[in-house]
């Protein structure tokens, strides 16, 4: 599914790739929808749990700029937390998320909503508590852009390496996190129209 999308893959294809009997797959999961939900549950539970832990810690920071930075890092870091597909994160799962988001499949969209909406809403409310003078609508849009950047960075880091002719390692997670965080903090601070806030350290 991470290579061909949800529609183009059958349960028979999945069983063949896993080298198991089709009957075993249908016995344990029933439908492809149930299997996809299980995949999301397996990957997103540790990611969401870590995000909530880090965001809770971030909200204790008194300085607003530092709190905003910590909140963005709390959202971004768990997606880079592991290169293993058995834990939250992982390139194949991230690619799957990106493909399903673009496919327009209602079943997949419902699964994605159940997996991420609660954590995303907490993130949005935490950002608004940090920047109350910014409108919720514009915070939502900037957060949406962060998510798109996060997907693209996780899946296409090699493009950075290619365009820089090897001068920059696009697969370097620490630098990717830092650049995403810095860009998003600057974008959100711009919404406050407060020079004093944007210059705080």
Image (cartoon, helix red, strand yellow):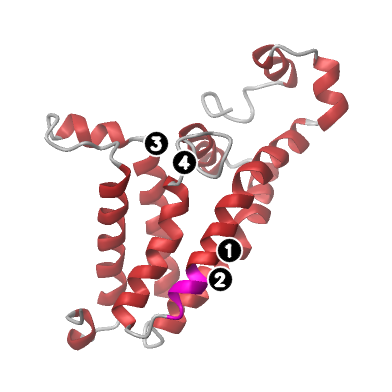
> Which of the marked residues, 3 or 2, is nearer the chain's N terminus?
2
Mark 1 or mark 4, which has the lower sequence index? 4
| Main secondary-structure element of the magenta-colored stretch | helix
Q: Which residue is mark 3?
A: 155
Of pointers 1 and 3, the one earlier in the residue sequence:
1
From the viewer's side, name the closer residue of 191 and 72: 72
Q: Is residue 57 magenta?
A: yes
> Residue 163: x, y in percent?
16, 33
Identify the residue at horizontal 81%, vertical 31% (top origin): 31
Spot occupied by residue 8 in the image (x, y as percentages of width and height): 62, 23
Real-space Cα separation, disc 1 to disc 4, in angstroms: 19 Å
Magenta residues span: 55-60
* Kind of element beneath mark 3: helix
If you read the primary sequence from the N terminus, does the residue marked by circle 2 or circle 4 appear first? 4
> What residue is shown at x 75% (from left), y 31% (from top)?
32
Q: Which residue is mark 4?
A: 82
Would you call the spot at circle 2 few (<14 residues within 10 Å), some (14-19), or many (20 or more)? Answer: some
Whole-number angstrom distance, CA of label 3 to CA of label 2:
25 Å
Q: Are marks 1 and 2 in contact (CB under 8 Å)?
A: yes
- Foreground disc of the pair 1, 4: 4
Alpha carbons under labels 2 and 4: distance apart? 23 Å
Q: Nearer the viewer, residue 45 or 134?
A: 45
Q: For the residues marked 3 and 4, what is the alpha-carbon distance in whole angstroms?
A: 14 Å
Residue at mark 1: 119
The residue tagged 2 is 122
Other residues around mark 1 within 10 Å, as few (<14) / some (14–19) / many (≥20): some
Q: Position of residue 57 (x, y in %)?
A: 48, 73
């Amino acid at each position: 599914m991470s290579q061909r999308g949800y529609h183009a893959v059958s349960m028979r294809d999945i069983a063949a790739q896993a080298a198991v009997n089709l009957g075993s797959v249908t016995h344990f999961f029933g439908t492809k929808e149930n299997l996809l939900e299980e995949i999301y549950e397996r990957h997103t539970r540790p990611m969401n749990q870590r995000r909530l832990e880090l965001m809770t810690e971030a909200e204790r920071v008194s300085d607003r700029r530092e709190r905003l930075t910590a909140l963005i890092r709390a959202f971004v870091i768990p997606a880079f937390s592991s290169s293993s597909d058995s834990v939250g994160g992982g390139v194949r799962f991230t690619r799957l998320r990106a493909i399903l988001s673009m496919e327009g499949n209602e079943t997949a969209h419902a699964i994605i909503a159940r997996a991420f909406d609660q954590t995303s809403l907490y993130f949005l409310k935490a950002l608004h508590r940090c920047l109350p003078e910014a409108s919720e609508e514009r915070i939502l849009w900037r957060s949406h852009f962060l998510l798109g950047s996060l997907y693209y960075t996780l899946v296409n880091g090699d493009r950075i390496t290619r365009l820089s002719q090897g001068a920059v390692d696009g697969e370097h997670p620490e630098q990717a996190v830092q650049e995403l965080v810095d860009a998003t903090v600057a974008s959100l601070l711009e919404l406050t129209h407060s020079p004093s806030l944007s210059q705080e350290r």
